[in-house]
Image (spheres, rainbow, N blue to C red):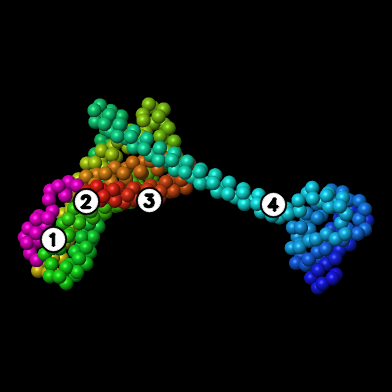
Amino acid sequence: MSEEKTKLFVLPESLSIENISAIFLEIKKLDQKSTLIIDFKSVKNIDSSAIALFNYLKRRHKDVSFKNISPGFQNLLSMFPLAVQELDKAVKRKGMIKRRIRSITDHIAGVKDQWKTFLVLFADEIYYTLQYLGSRRGVYPGEIMNQLFFMGYKSFPIVSLISFLVGLTISVTSLEQLKNFGADIYLADLVGFGMIRELVPLMTGIILAGKIGASITAEISSMKVMEETDALKTMGIIPEKFLMVPRLIGITLAVPLLVCIADFVGILAGVMVAQVLSGILPKVFFNEMFNVVKIGDFFIGMMKTVVFGWLVVVCSGYKGFSVKQGAAGVGIATTESVVLSISSIIVFDCIFAFLLY
């Protein structure tokens, strides 16, 4: 040992498989952080087992050098690269990059296939709906009325309540700011325009996604898992038509009713706030509101809500038909349908905003 952290190890005359294990045990006892000097002064013959030992030393010790090595042994060692650790890191790094690239491409391909399936289902539903309206076949009799009852009558209490509370909140917070400028009367314009064109369609779509979308996905995915959709196919019935067309027609008929009720309730909340907090009479409120809000705004809000309703039904049906087997798959599909429906509604609402303003 020439220094405190330098170890000198003198090799024996022969480096062969017979004695290499004993040398390995002796070197293993040395400190890994020390600088190791291998002395070849006495070495006369060497085989491949020694090469493996030197590679191990290169990985285990931070610094390994050779002393008194003959040119022949030096040429032999140069045939086997000692920087195995660096090569391993490079190989691992290259493999990791390949795995990441493969993972990204697989994800992109999966998203592309999902969008393709979704668009195909959407186009099929439009075709099946038009086909049913022309032939009146392929749908269980009375199912449209059942869906209209569920989507309309069963939904209007929660839609009315949420619209009233949203209208109340918007009116109170807006009036507080308008009073600073003496513009209390413009609360009518803000509530009327905001509720009819933006808030009512958006809130109605989100409520439909949470209430109706989750129900549709749970029902269809359960039928898919229980192989009831396969039973429909064996009877010559198209599941996508039999199950989806009544829901699409039902949501189309239910949305105008829900929009009318939600608009009335939301504006009523604004009228109440204006009357109580600012003393604005309902007649004055409506006169000001109708100076800004036109009948076209009402139909724009209704059109947006119909589109949102169709998005909810198609997204829910898509997740229902693509469910994986098992009860867990039904729960996952239901959650994903709500998330997909609400995300689609927000995206399309942004698109409408750019197109209409």
Of the residues under marks 2 and 3, which one precedes in the sequence? 3
Magenta portion: prevailing SS class: helix
- The residue wearing badge 3 is 339
Q: CA distance from mark 1 to mark 4?
A: 73 Å
In front: 299, or 77? 77
From what the image shows, is residue 141 above or below residue 89?
above
Which amino acid type is marked by label 2? Tyr
Of the residues under marks 4 and 3, which one precedes in the sequence? 4
Q: Position of residue 99 (x, y in %)?
A: 57, 47
| Residue 188's disc number | 1
Q: Residue pushed farthest front? A: 71
Foreground mark, 3 or 1, reads 1
- Which picture quadrant has residue 181? bottom left
Q: Examine the rendering and report whether any part of residue 223 can be seen.
A: no
Q: CA distance from mark 2 to mark 3?
A: 27 Å
Q: Is residue 329 left or right of residue 23?
A: left
Q: Position of residue 297 (x, y in %)?
A: 16, 49
- The residue wearing badge 2 is 357
Q: Position of residue 270 (x, y in %)?
A: 16, 62
From what the image shows, is residue 113 above or below residue 190?
above
Q: CA distance from mark 2 to mark 4?
A: 60 Å
| Stretch in magenta | 280-300
From what the image shows, is residue 240 above or below residue 106?
above
Q: CA distance from mark 2 to mark 1?
A: 20 Å
Question: Are the residues at dot 4 and dot 3 in contact (C-beta closer than 8 Å)?
Answer: no
- The residue wearing badge 4 is 87
Question: Are the residues at dot 2 and dot 3 in contact (C-beta closer than 8 Å)?
Answer: no
- Which picture quadrant has residue 174? bottom left
Foreground mark, 2 or 4, reads 4
Which amino acid type is marked by label 3? Val
Q: Residues within 10 Å of mark 2 (few under 14, many from 20)?
A: few
